C-alpha cells in the first residue's frame, strides 16, 4: 500500500487522536485542530476524526483494539488514502498499524517534516530538514524505504531483505547523517563568525507561532519585501535587516522559523545555527496572533522552545497581531 501513496493528487484522510487524562479537553481539541491544519497544508482532505479516551498509549498499536476495529470498518466502507495520528508513532506502531489497517499511516512528526521539506529553500534549510528527517528515519528502518520516501524522496534502493540488509541500511543512513552534520558544522562556524562581527550591534529577533505574522511585521519595520504568505512555516531561514530607529539607534532585526505545538525535538536541534540568532539577541519581539482562539497554547509553545534553546531570559516585547480579525 505504501508505494501506491502519492502526494501529487487529492488525498482523503482520517485523523486519529488519543485523549489522555493529563491533557485538558481544550488542549486536546486544539491539538486536533492543529493536526487538521497541518494536514490541510499538504493538500489532504479530512473526512473523519476519531477520538479515543484512554489512560495510556497502547504500545503495539498506539490506540486500543476497539477503536482500531472501528477505524478498520470505516476504511473498508469509505475511500480513504491515509490515516493520520495526532502524535509521534514508534516504528513498531507504524508497522503494526499499516499491516492491520492495510493503508498508509502518518504520525504527527512525519507530517511536520514533510511540510518543512516543502518549505526549505536555501541549502542550509534543506540540510537542516534532511538531518531531522534522517534521524527520524533511523529507528524506523524496518518499515521499508518506501515509507520514508514520502518525506525525503528516498535515499537509495533496497538490495534484499532480512537483518543483513537492515544493517546495511543503517550504515547508509548513519553515513548520510554524519556527512550532513559535517556540512552543517561548517555553516555553523560561518554563522558564528558573522555573529561575532555583530556582537556590538543591537540585534533584535522576531519569534512567534507559525503564521502569526512575523515576516509581515519584518517587512513593515524594515521596508523590505520578504516572502510572506498566509500559510504554515513560510519562513525557515533566518533573515536579517538593518532598521533605522532614530539618529542614536539602529537595530539588526532577524526573522526566524515559526514554532508550533509539539515541535519535534529533532527539528529544534537541526535548526541550531538558525535558532542561535535568537540566543544572541538583546531583545526578542514575540509576535502573537491576537485573533487565535488558542492564544494561550500558542504563547506557551513559543516560550517552551525559547526555554529549550536557553533564550528565555532575554527581555521580550509581546506584539499582538491581526487586530483586523
Image: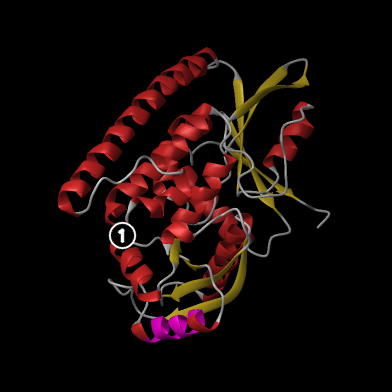
- Provide the residue designation for mark 1: 91
Q: Position of residue 36 (x, y in %)?
A: 59, 65
Q: Is residue 208 left or right of residue 66?
A: right
Q: Main secondary structure of the magenta part?
A: helix
Q: Is residue 62 left or right of residue 249?
A: left
How many residues crowd around disc 1 within 10 Å: few (fewer than 14), some, or many (20 or more)? some
Answer above or below: position of 27 versus 251: below
In the image, residue 171 lies in the stretch drawn in magenta: no
Q: Position of residue 172 (x, y in %)?
A: 27, 37
In magenta, the rendered stretch is: 66-75
- Camera-side residue of 13 and 198: 13
Residue in the image at 56% along x and 75% along y: 79
Residue 275 appears in the rendering: no
Residue 53 appears in the rendering: yes
Picture colour scheme: secondary structure
In the image, residue 67 lies in the stretch drawn in magenta: yes
Q: Which quarter of the picture shows residue 45?
A: bottom right
Quadrant assignment for the N terminus: bottom left
Amino acid at each position: 500500500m505504501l508505494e501506491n501513496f502519492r502526494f501529487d493528487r487529492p488525498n482523503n484522510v482520517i485523523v486519529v487522536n488519543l485523549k489522555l487524562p493529563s491533557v485538558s479537553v481544550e488542549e486536546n481539541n486544539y491539538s486536533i485542530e492543529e493536526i487538521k491544519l497541518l494536514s490541510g497544508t499538504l493538500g489532504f482532505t479530512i473526512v473523519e476524526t476519531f477520538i479515543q479516551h484512554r489512560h495510556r498509549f497502547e504500545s503495539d498499536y498506539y490506540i486500543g483494539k476497539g477503536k482500531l476495529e472501528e477505524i478498520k470498518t470505516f476504511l473498508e466502507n469509505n475511500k480513504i488514502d491515509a490515516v493520520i495520528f495526532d502524535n509521534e508513532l514508534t516504528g513498531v506502531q507504524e508497522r503494526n498499524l499499516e499491516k492491520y489497517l492495510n493503508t498508509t499511516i502518518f504520525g504527527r512528526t512525519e507530517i511536520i517534516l514533510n511540510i518543512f521539506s516543502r518549505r526549505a529553500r536555501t541549502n542550509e534549510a534543506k540540510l537542516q530538514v534532511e538531518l531531522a528527517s534522517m534521524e527520524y528515519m533511523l529507528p524506523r528502518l524496518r518499515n521499508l524505504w518506501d515509507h520514508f520516501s514520502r518525506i525525503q524522496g528516498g535515499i537509495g534502493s533496497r538490495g534484499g531483505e532480512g537483518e543483513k540488509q537492515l544493517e546495511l541500511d543503517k550504515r547508509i543512513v548513519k553515513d548520510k547523517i554524519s556527512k550532513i552534520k559535517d556540512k552543517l558544522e561548517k555553516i555553523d562556524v560561518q554563522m558564528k563568525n558573522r555573529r561575532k562581527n555583530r556582537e556590538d550591534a543591537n540585534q533584535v529577533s522576531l519569534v512567534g507561532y507559525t503564521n502569526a505574522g512575523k515576516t509581515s511585521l519584518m517587512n513593515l519595520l524594515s521596508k523590505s519585501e520578504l516572502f510572506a504568505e498566509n500559510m504554515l512555516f513560510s519562513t525557515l531561514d533566518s533573515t536579517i535587516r538593518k532598521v533605522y530607529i532614530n539618529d542614536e539607534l539602529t537595530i539588526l532585526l532577524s526573522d526566524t522559523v515559526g514554532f508550533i505545538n509539539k515541535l519535534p525535538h529533532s527539528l529544534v536541534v537541526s535548526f541550531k545555527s538558525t535558532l542561535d540568532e535568537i540566543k544572541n539577541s538583546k531583545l526578542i519581539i514575540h509576535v502573537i496572533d491576537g485573533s487565535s482562539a488558542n492564544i494561550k497554547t500558542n504563547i506557551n509553545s513559543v516560550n517552551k522552545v525559547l526555554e529549550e534553546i536557553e533564550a528565555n531570559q532575554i527581555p521580550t516585547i509581546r506584539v499582538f497581531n491581526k487586530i483586523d480579525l
